[in-house]
Image (cartoon, coloured by chain):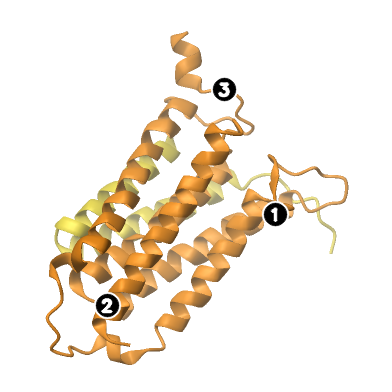
Chain colours: A orange, B yellow
Amino acid sequence: MTQARAITLNALSLYAVALVLAAAYAAQFIVHELPCPLCLLQRILFAALAVGPILNIRFGPRPSHYAMSLLAAVAGAAASTRQVLLHILPGDAGYGSALLGYHYYTWALIGFIAAIILIAAVMLFDRQFEDDGAVLPATGGIFAQIAVWLVIMLTVANVVTTLLECGFGACADNPLVYEMLERAA
Amino acid sequence: MEFTLLFLATAIVMVIAWRGPRPLALGLFGAVLIACVATYLHHATDTLKLSF
């Protein structure tokens, strides 16, 4: 795999992270289900997955950048596994609604495991780590730049919505209202 | 509040990774990841009702 192909793949992975963050927003705003503290932590770790690809696009692919995403994916898998285990007993309806038979935290666990496998698979291609002399577009080209700013904007949007949901105190275990909006009303 | 700060820190790390020095981005990413694990451990106090 050439450096240029690896950078395109990294840009695609950023679009995948953006899709996950947008899907979480769809559940929050369309189904009106506010994320619980563990759900928020999983969102943060999905966003953290994006830092490795951003560095790969800017500085070129390096094993250390992939390792950063792997660490974020492992932490995310641990958090989502805990939430799956919290609701695993028969008779437990789980937290929130289900999508295609699985709750969002189960989808998150599948997503983090898929990320671990895909990152490991991409790291098998050693040629991306060698300078092949190809002239790469500055900061990955427009396709990659849009991906980077999309993920950054979605993460900044989460700063605002999380502040509205939790306010300046601790987030509720089972949030039903936006604390800040409730206080202002 | 801690989740708002973690989102904010992650966004800052992303901007530094895109525009700032690489060592700073790596260091801040490590700090954010440690903060995430600490937050997880702080919140993971409910007993898992499992009996293996």
Q: Is residue B51 left or right of residue A6?
A: right
Question: Residue A133: where, in percent of width, then height?
Answer: 13, 89
What residue is shown at x 75% (from left), y 44% (from top)? A94
**Mark 3 sits on what residue?**
A177
Question: Residue B49: where, in percent of width, then height?
Answer: 80, 50
Q: Chain of mark 1?
A: A
How far, Cα to Cα, is label 2 from label 1?
34 Å
Query: Is mark 2 in CB contact (under 8 Å) with mark 1?
Result: no
Q: Are marks 2 and 1 on the same chain?
A: yes
Element on which disc 2 rests: loop
Above or below A104: residue A134:
below
Q: Which mark is residue A61?
A: 2
Q: Amino acid at mark 1?
A: Val
Q: Is residue B26 left or right of residue B50?
A: left
Element on which disc 1 rests: helix
Looking at the rendered image, the quarter that the N terminus of chain A falls into is bottom left
Query: Is mark 1 in CB contact (under 8 Å) with mark 3?
Result: no
Q: Nearer the viewer, residue A145 or A55?
A: A145
